[in-house]
């Protein structure tokens, strides 16, 4: 009878330990998922931010003014 009580108490202890381990694993998984979501949102906010770290360089035209005028005239004619 003493061994049966010992076995049932051991079984209860094992069940409690298993429950604690599974619960801890679930909590850690949830925390990790929330943390990864926060990092993802923060990186999206940084990329969408209108403040740029480096100023844009001035883009220089490769066409002369005459060529530019001709191209704009062509585009206007084609659009009509």
Image (cartoon, rainbow, N blue to C red):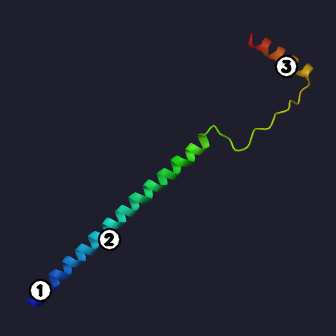
Sequence-wise, the earlier of marks 3 and 1 is: 1
Foreground of the two, 18 or 24: 24
What's the distance in space between the residues labelled 2 and 3, CA to CA? 72 Å
Q: Position of residue 56 (x, y in %)?
A: 76, 38
Q: Residues within 10 Å of mark 3 (few under 14, many from 20)?
A: few
The CA distance from mark 3 to mark 1 is 96 Å
N-terminal label among 2 and 3: 2
Q: Is residue 70 above or below residue 7?
A: above
Of 78 and 6, the residue lying toward us: 6
Residue 39 is marked as none
Residue 57: x %, y % from top left: 80, 38
Give me the disc on residue 71. 3
Residue at horizontal 61%, vertical 40%? 49
Q: Is residue 65 left or right of residue 30?
A: right
| Mark linked to residue 21 | 2
Q: Earlier in the sequence, mark 1 or mark 2?
A: 1
Q: Secondary structure at mark 3?
A: helix
Image quadrant in which the N terminus is located: bottom left
Q: Secondary structure at mark 1?
A: helix
Spatial CA distance of label 1 from label 2 is 26 Å
Q: Residue at x 65, y 39 (%)?
A: 51
Query: Percent from the top left, x then y, of residue 47?
Result: 61, 43
The tag on residue 4 is 1
């Amino acid at each position: 009878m003493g061994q049966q009580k010992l076995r049932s108490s051991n079984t209860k202890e094992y069940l409690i330990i298993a429950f604690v381990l599974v619960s801890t694993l679930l909590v850690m998984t949830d925390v990790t998922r929330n943390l990864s979501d926060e990092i993802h949102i923060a990186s999206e906010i940084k990329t969408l931010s209108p403040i740029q770290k480096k100023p844009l360089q001035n883009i220089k035209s490769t066409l002369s003014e005459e060529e530019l005028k001709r191209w704009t005239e062509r585009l206007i004619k084609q659009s009509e």
